[in-house]
Image (cartoon, helix red, strand yellow):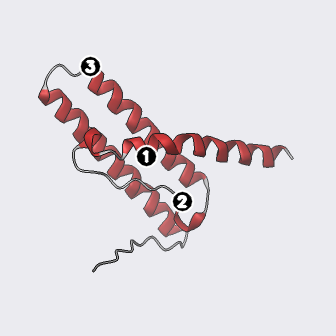
Amino acid sequence: MKIRNMILTATGAAMMILPAVGAAAHPSHGGAQQEILRQPIGNVENNYWFDYLTDIQEAEHELKKDLARATDDEDRRDAKEEYRNEIADANKDYKKEMKEKGYNVGRVTVGR
């Protein structure tokens, strides 16, 4: 029962993080909109997924702190560039781990 409660707690924590993830994807935060996953690959909530959510939350938190301390446009550009790099790194790490575990890590694009 204790493990089940831990899983439910972790899932609840992920659900609390997701609204922040949506805010992090907003173009005004980082210039070009970054791809932030809204659900785990293969719908598998594992340690890699929770690590990913933590990385996204930390990137959002750091961006807010950096923007609050920014004194000029260059500081703001640097903060946004660092944010974009952190998001890209989180995506790369998570997708790499899931691919190594055998999950399909593709992207489907539907065109006209």
Label 1 SS:
helix
Q: Amino acid at mark 3?
A: Arg
Observer-nearest residue: 26 or 3? 26
Circle 3 Cα neighbour tier, 10 Å, few/some/many (<14 / 14–19 / ≥20): few
Residue at x 29%, y 21% (from the top left corner): 68
Task: Check disc 2 and report the residue beneath it.
Answer: 40
Task: Check disc 3 and report the residue beneath it.
Answer: 69
Q: CA distance from mark 2 to mark 3?
A: 33 Å
Residue at x 62%, y 41% (from the top left corner): 13
Q: Earlier in the sequence, mark 1 or mark 3?
A: 1
Q: Amino acid at mark 2?
A: Pro
Residue at x 66%, y 47% (from the top left corner): 11
Q: Amino acid at mark 1?
A: Gly
Q: CA distance from mark 1 to mark 3?
A: 23 Å
Circle 1 Cα neighbour tier, 10 Å, few/some/many (<14 / 14–19 / ≥20): few
Q: CA distance from mark 1 to mark 2?
A: 14 Å
Q: Are marks 1 and 2 in contact (CB under 8 Å)?
A: no
Task: Check disc 1 and report the residue beneath it.
Answer: 22
